[in-house]
Amino acid sequence: MIAPADIKKTVKLNILRQDTPDTHPYWQQFEVPCTPSSNVTSLLRSISANPVTAEGAQVAPPAYEASCLEEVCGSCTMLINGKVRQACSTLVRKIQSGHPDEPITIEPLTKFPVIRDLVVDRSRMFENLKRIKAWIPIDSSYNLGPGPKITPEEQQTMYPLSRCMTCGSCLEACPQFTRDNNFLGAQIFSIARYYNMHPNGKTEKDARMEVLMGEGGITDCGNAQNCVKVCPKEIPLTESIGIIGRAATVYSIKKFFSK
Amino acid sequence: MAQKRVIVVGGGLAGLSTSMKLSEEGVAVDLFSLVPVKRSHSVCAQGGINACNDVARQQGYSEWEHFDETVFGGDFLAHQPPVLEMARMAPAIIDLLDRMGVPFSRTPEGNRDLRLFGGSLYKRTFYAGATTGQQLLYALDEQVRHHEVQGHVTKYEFWEFLAPVLDDNGRCVGIVAQDLRTMQIRSFRADAVVMATGGNGLIFGQSTMSIICTGSGTARCYQAGARLGNPEFVQVHPTAIPGEDKCRLMSESARGEGGRLWVPKKRQDSRHPNDIPEQERDYFLERLYPKYKNIVPRDIATREIFYICEQGYGIGGGQMVYLDLTEKATGIPYDVLKRKLGGILEIYEKFVGVDPLLEPMKIYPAVHYSMGGLWVDFAKDEKTGGLRKADPRNQMTNITGLYAAGEADYQYHGANRLGANSLLSCIFTGLFMAPGIKKFIESQPPVAEQAQTIYDAAVAGQQAVQSRLLNSKGTDNPYVMHRELGKAMSDNVTIIRSNAKLRQTLSLIESLKDRYQNNLGLPDSGLWNNQSLGFARACWDMILLGEAVTSAALAREESRGSHFKIPDELVDRHDLPLDKRALQRDDEHWLKSTLVSYVDGKATLSYEPVDVSLVAPRARNYGKVTAPATNAASAETAGAAV
């Protein structure tokens, strides 16, 4: 797996840059050292240490977000060769394999406002967590004994949902989610399912359903199923969408009869 | 009168638990973080969180045992009352996390499952798959979001802490911080400030830490007069995937669940590991430590790996050994380990390209955790042996009103941290200190009455630093200088230390300081989301922390926990076992905490006694055997016992 013959010692990167939110984007090419274990974040770090374009111009290093470098924090989501990926777990040898001379293109996510270069504003995802009350209500942090028992089956259903790192890949790939609408998207549907499942999280279920059935809610999902294909954590997003969809139906019937 | 406010810097487990508890106590919180708090480094913790539990208790375990293991694991350098208090509160913390919805792994009956972890013979580690830190962080993140919605907490994400603001009496009354997008520098008033900014792995170049873990938060308090405690104690975790950008942790839980470390008995054995038969493998930790086997504490496992590789038994003669999770080695079915360890198996598979359940992993030690950090106080309760509840002294640094929590403090792990105690110490410090902070701010005049001039002066000071940096036109790129620092620190100040190498590192640090002051060149001089500026500032902090770590290591003439010193004349004596080369633990002279102050631009050392009032220090060798060798490797290792 290490060092296939076609790995070059340098690699070309075409990076879509944008100085500020209001200015026009432009492309810049860099040629940077590359080893068999290089990932896209290490290439970006190399540019920071020597920010010179392929044409030899000294420039400001491209801004990007990164933190854990092991695909668990969700920071470094970007478009790499047109596909939404985590830059840290994108190994150059993998995406280069077969065509080592072609430059790798790197662009910011398109569904979120650009701050600078590859940095985008994903605060919408966090704001949506507030809207759906993404928490388990507790009385206080004083010692009040253990939580409810959970069967291993329930835990094994909930645990994968709780690995969502708010990276935004599912939203980037979703045709329904755009910069100027308020569609909630798979991230929120799946997290809502998680809280609705929990014995104490259920107490907020009705409030959650109101949001999930409001504007930009579950009925706007076009069922393109792109989300589940790009989720780096392989969260069963379409399953969650189905479950929230059915819960919405049940909730509206319940609401109808309790009028 | 305005409501009193507390600033919490850092949104990992320690910062979030502090924020949650303060909110609950009715104190307004302003929470600052470089990244959205949900992306904090706690997210990387994998294996679990320790606490005495019903099962272990019935087998003879207790909170006292947990306390004893922790101080023993830390080679008796930790003050004992805070550790005892932490061990006592641990079971309640697990229950709390459970109520907050952490998806702990479950037994068939629906109870929270337990696993074995380093330094203990009892199962006392609760876990959520192999992403326990992520699950705990998310649960606390959600609680704090709930408080945020209710107006108790105000978040400042993508803001960088630049310095504490001190009044004329030296009390901390706020901070200066910078918006990382607009680059606006401004001051914030606070009746108390809590530093929960984590460890400093980045000073070693590559570590298992996130790249935001520069230690800057700590270093900026240090430059403002806060003391560091025990900075020379740096945990090198035995099992990580070596990498050029970072070393990716392979959790101790891999061994807790049955994983085994081995090397081929034949030097430079070129066979595929799966083709090397059982009798031709040296499971060296099992051979050396028949009682604890693969779960000896980290400092010990790390040195054994280093030694066996030094003797030429590493994979291909290099610096790597096998961590084996295959069914052939563990006897545990594929699906079981997949379920329990999925999170880390995925990391190995994604970054190395091999399924570690089918083929042994290749690992080597990597810098992982800062036992040292900001010195903090504690108030011992003579009646219980633990801490006095709601005492303002608990977790306060030597700067009045400036507190520290989690990995940023030095308090709980002594000379070596036990696995799965870090999540515990983060949450414990946050929850335990909050009532004391509340009491403190109630006893103080409100900062709303402070003169604006001290805040303005602090902002002006930071603006001056910034404009100097932005106008620096030298040729030393901060990222390149960081690489130089990291390489020297990694080569000379990690597993094995010798005074010659430490002195050499200090002189490199001197030259880095000089180059930084006189020849720095910033690749970006803009004032919009300028990441080079932040990194350049952190680079200075890392140089100073490197100096503190190295100076303290140079001064400490003994071996203790992670600090393992070999006299210069024995450094090349590869014919001797490591323990025969190194200095021994010296309680008579060195059972004391190192305190480092920043005086006249330099690290200045002093010492204070360790509170060992609860258990007397004893020899620490985890039952290492000196039995006759069964192969060449063990022949050389025999006699290596303490």
Image (cartoon, grey):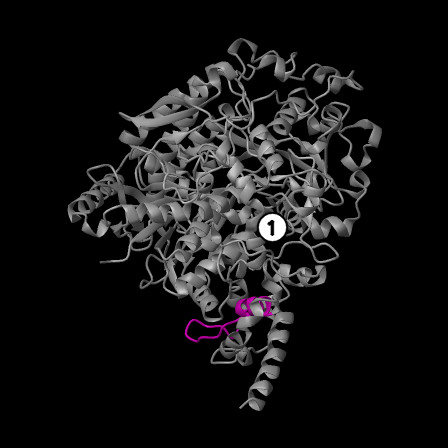
Query: Crowdedness of circle 1 by 10 Å Cα count: few (<14), some, many (20+)?
Result: many
- Residue at figure coordinates x 19%, y 38% from the top left: B168
Image coordinates of residue B169 in percent, x first then y, are: 21, 37
- Residue at figure coordinates x 53%, y 50% from the top left: B43
- Residue at figure coordinates x 55%, y 86% from the top left: A255
Residue type, mark 1 in image? Thr
Residue A11 magenta: no
Image coordinates of residue B116 in percent, x first then y, are: 68, 40
Q: Chain of mark 1?
A: B
Q: Is residue B79 above or below residue B172?
A: above
Image coordinates of residue B367 in percent, x first then y, are: 53, 33
Nearer the observer, A52 or B233: B233
Q: Quadrant of the C terminus of chain B?
A: top right
- Residue at figure coordinates x 52%, y 15% from the top left: B586
Q: Identify the residue at the far front of this view.
A: B383
Image coordinates of residue B269 in percent, x first then y, are: 76, 27
| Residue B357 visible (yes or no) | yes
Q: Which residue is mark 1?
A: B131
Nearer the observer, B381 or B451: B381
Q: Element under label 1?
A: loop
Q: Quadrant of residue B630?
A: top right
Nearer the observer, B582 or B355: B582
What is the tally of numbered marks visible in this picture? Answer: 1
| Residue B36 visible (yes or no) | no
Q: Which residues are magenta?
A: A174-196
Q: Identify the residue at the far top of this view.
A: B569
Q: Quadrant of residue B276?
A: top right
Q: Is residue B365 above or below residue A202?
A: above
Residue A185 magenta: yes
Q: Is residue B412 above or below residue A103?
A: above
Q: Quadrant of the N terminus of chain B?
A: bottom left
